[in-house]
Image (spheres, rainbow, N blue to C red):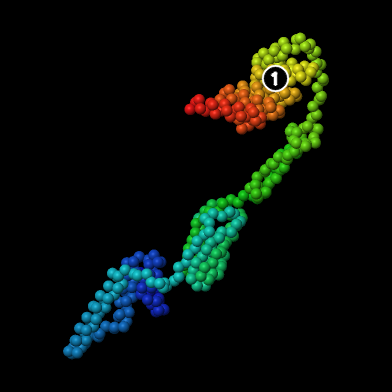
Amino acid sequence: MNQLKPFIIDALRRGYSIDQVRLHLQQSHFPIDQINQAMYEVQLDQYHAQNPPVQKVHHLHLASLLILIFLVISFSFGLYIVYDNFILAKPEIQSAVLIPKMDIAPLTMQVYQGEEFTLSITLKGTHIIILDLQDLNHNSLKTESIEIENKKVTSITIPKDLLPGKYFLYATVDDLEESILFTVKEKKVDTCPVCDDRNSCTSDYCSADTDFQCTYKPIIPCCGDGFCALAEQCDVDCKKTATPPPVKPIKVDTETLFRQLEYVKNLSIINRDEALNICEKMSFQASKDQCYLNVVGSIYDPNLCNKIVSPDVFDKCFTLIAQDSGDSTFCEELAESANKDACYFSFVSKNEFYCEKISDPTRKNVCFSLKEYYARSTS
């Protein structure tokens, strides 16, 4: 209370209004009852100073009595005004304040050792602000002074050897003080470890782009990686396959050829590899082609058709695959146009019509006729 009265008297003497003084004291967190009581006493002191008490006289004249009554009424009315305006009335917020308000806003609540802690300070007018870095025990660790005019974005450098943890930053100017509690984090060492993986077929590198972690990128092609890449010249990876010794052909007379081909066909059902081995050892290509055709007839492997050299047997092979699998797309593999037409035409018996893919006009017309007849008979 004793502190408020001198402050109020000084502020009123400097030209601030009652409402401005009241608002500033409220913003400074003084209790409202103390503010009202102090203002009441200041008003009362001012009134007594302006209206000194009337000296007692032994003989009161009528005029003096009237003056005394007037003063008593005026004093009572003054007390009522003071009580109504400063004790009961709620303060209204005015546009002008006694002391400007300072706002500080950090750009982040975390900062690494040795980096800048940046904040925005807003304060009307031109001022010198003291920034004070303190620990949680309020020990001052570092101070800096800055000049600000209305608003400024500034920063304070966090010491590199400052331990990670919580810290205060105080901003002080005149009687204003604001503080920020923020976190100092340990700064990672921006250096790369040794990244040599002792592999000549990888590119080892480390940088800020990899967050200072080792990264290994394969080098392709690379001699010594155990893989022979396309166009790679490396004796280690691309070992030349030794030429196998020539297969001694088995002579088969014409009388036993048919029986052997039937044997291969039956053998392929239970032992595909052995059957193909017999085909490979046959002396004549025509015998080999027929042997492969017999194996395909048992296991339906279209890849074996590509081993056949004779165009006619080759077409028979894919026709057999198309018919047995029911897939007409194998007809496209046939070399001869006539054989291809026959392949597509064979699907007519399955009520599947690919007439538009047949090139021979006569056979195509027959195909469309059969297709029309089938459509009428099923409708």
Tell me where residue 49 appears, x and y as whole percent: 32, 82
Q: In which quarter of the image is residue 71?
A: bottom left
Tell me where residue 98 appears, x and y as whole percent: 42, 73
Is 287 in front, or is 247?
287
Is 365 in front, or is 128?
365
Is 131 in front, or is 95?
95
Tell me where residue 353 appears, x and y as whole percent: 58, 28
Q: Mark 1 points at which residue?
A: 293
Q: Mark 1 Cα within 10 Å, few/some/many (few <14, many 20+)?
A: many
Counting labels gives 1
- Say which residue appears at 54% left-offset and 69% top-offset: 148
Horizontal side of 283 relative to 131 (left or right) equals: right
Is 211 in front, or is 227?
227
- Say which residue appears at 58% left-offset and 22% top-offset: 349
Q: What element carries label 1?
A: helix
Residue 323 seen in the current view:
yes
Viewport quadrant of the N terminus:
bottom left
Q: Quadrant of residue 312?
A: top right
- Say which residue appears at 74% left-offset and 35% top-offset: 229
65 vs 211: above or below: below
Tell me where residue 244 appears, x and y as whole percent: 80, 22
- Say which residue appears at 22% left-offset and 86% top-offset: 67
